[in-house]
Amino acid sequence: MRADADADAAPRAANADANARVVGADASDARDARNDAVRGQDVEGDVDRARDGDAPTVSSVVDALVKHHLAEREGKRTSRMPSHEFWETQPVRQFGEDTSRGAELREGPIDPPKLASETSESGGALPPGYEWCSCDMTDSRTQEEVYELLTNNYVEDDDAMFRFQYSQEFLKWALRPPEYHGDWHVGVRLKVTQTLVAFITGVPAKLRVKGKEIDLAEINFLCIHKKLRSKRIAPTLIKEITRRVNAKDVWQATYTAGVLLPKPISKARYWHRSLDIKKLVDIGFTRLGRDASMSRAVQMFKLAAKPKSEGLRHMTEADVPRVTALLSKYLTRFAVAPIMNEAEVRHWLLPREDVVFSYVVEDEKTNKITDFVSFYNLPSQIIHSKTKHKTLKAAYSYYNVATSMPLVKLMEDALILARNNAFDVFNALDLMENESFLSALKFGIGDGNLHYYLYNWRILEDLEPSEIALVLT
Ligand code: MYA
């Protein structure tokens, strides 16, 4: 947790989850933190050993550090590097691989091309008593089952205070974009009772990565019932979704996670803007700085009653072609960004009650859409009992384009709109040009990371979050 100097309030958002999108860290982040600590200790161990030697000189200390560094660069395992029994076998960037100039690695697919017909027809082996299924997200009973599984078992913060609570409407939106495949919604059921106990999903998308267009799967909602954790079921689920994606002749994927795995292309950070500071403090999401009073904090986070930009209105169906054009042009600025056609913009960005909120500014003279702002609704359950509140209402910044005004002005209106829609907090990643408004609009930095990954696609250099324009729900 970090005191927020500007706002005198520290958002909790520890180790951001996952989907860091949550208010807190997920358990794997805690493990990350532990891994980091171990790594730190190990370096110190080497350094101590050097110090304890006959001649504890500065150079022996430096030697120990250099030795570590070189071993890592050569791809050798050192005690600082956690092992990843599963991920080390997968076509993903690996820690310690040599990507220096002149090295053999190239940007692009990691595995040689294969044929969809070569993919095996049956799923991987589950523990006895469990079976694979596809979750039909058009069926209300199945939607409820998925909702229940996620509501009780999905991403939480480290201290088990908050857990994501995706609504059924949200899940239908996130899992049924144009051209989605029903069998990319993978479930595991207990054979006897047919209870859904694990889940992982993919949806088709097109991504531009450093100038190359890639048809891929966006992987999300990996979830295993709490009682079935640490049994190596996650790798089985990942292999199964890979098999089903490959069967559709798709060989790449993207995903985000709070947990550090081999090996992110970028590391983003969540920021949080208090809208209802009283509630946020009451539920333990935010704490006031040592010298701050609640009345001062309320004053500080006060927003205007209504948006200030003239002509700002809800996006409508008729705006789809112009929003597609505006957004597509804007997204070409970034190294990693989705490519969305009109059908996809219609799906992902047209307002949906209680799910996604989108607004445009239209130039009255030219009829051009000059600005676009959007956020989605992802509440978290409050799972600790120290408050009467049950739900934290969080808005998440989605895609925003400002051409007739500075982005900071447009985003101030987004905050006002979110507050007017009863959200308690507005969350944004430091992606795209978001840094230009975060501090100015009194966002406080969270203290967790959201890692971005590509599967079976190598880029040589890590990217800055400002080079990423992909927001996964
Ligand atoms: S991120 C959201 C993840 N979900 C949660 O955090 C919800 C709460 N937690 C759980 O349900 C479980 O703890 C999960 C792990 C299911 C996360 N991504 O079965 P295990 C690796 C990838 O014993 P469990 C999201 O949805 C771990 O490093 N791998 O562990 C994006 C270890 O491997 P290795 C993860 O705790 C998902 C192995 O699993 C993650 O019982 C993207 C241990 O397995 C994670 N978040 O279950 C998935 N967490 O030994 C990848 C742990 O090697 C998609 N692990 O370190 C890849 C692309 C596939 C398609 C390709 C198509 C071409």
Image (tube, grey):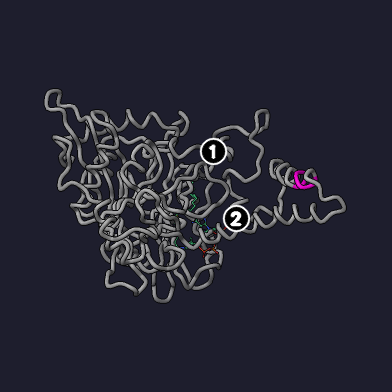
Answer with the quarter of the image where residue 19 lies.
Answer: bottom left
Amino acid type at mark 2 = Asp
Do residues under tags 1 and 2 come within 8 Å of each other at their CB atoms?
Answer: no
Give percent across and percent down for residue 194. 39, 72
Is residue 130 shown above or below 323?
A: below
Q: Which residue is mark 1?
A: 462
Residue 66's disc number: none
Name the residue located 56 percent from the left edge and 35 percent from the top edge.
Answer: 461
Q: Mark yes or no: residue 248 visible.
A: yes
Farthest residue in the bottom direction?
A: 192
User: 70 or 2: which is nearer to us?
Assistant: 2
Magenta residues, start to end:
60-64
**Any part of residue 171 in sight:** no
For the point 12% across and 27% down, the residue is 364
For this view, does 355 lie left or right of residue 195? left
Can you give x and y, in whole percent of width and height, for residue 445 in the image? Answer: 41, 50
Q: Secondary structure at mark 1?
A: loop
Q: Position of residue 15 (x, y in %)?
A: 47, 56
Residue 36, labelled with which disc? 2
Q: Main secondary structure of the magenta part?
A: helix
The outermost residue toward the left is 364
User: On the rendered structure, is 89 left or right of 280?
Assistant: right
Q: Is residue 410 left or right of residue 184?
A: left
Task: Label 2: state its secondary structure.
Answer: helix
Report x, y in % for residue 340: 32, 36
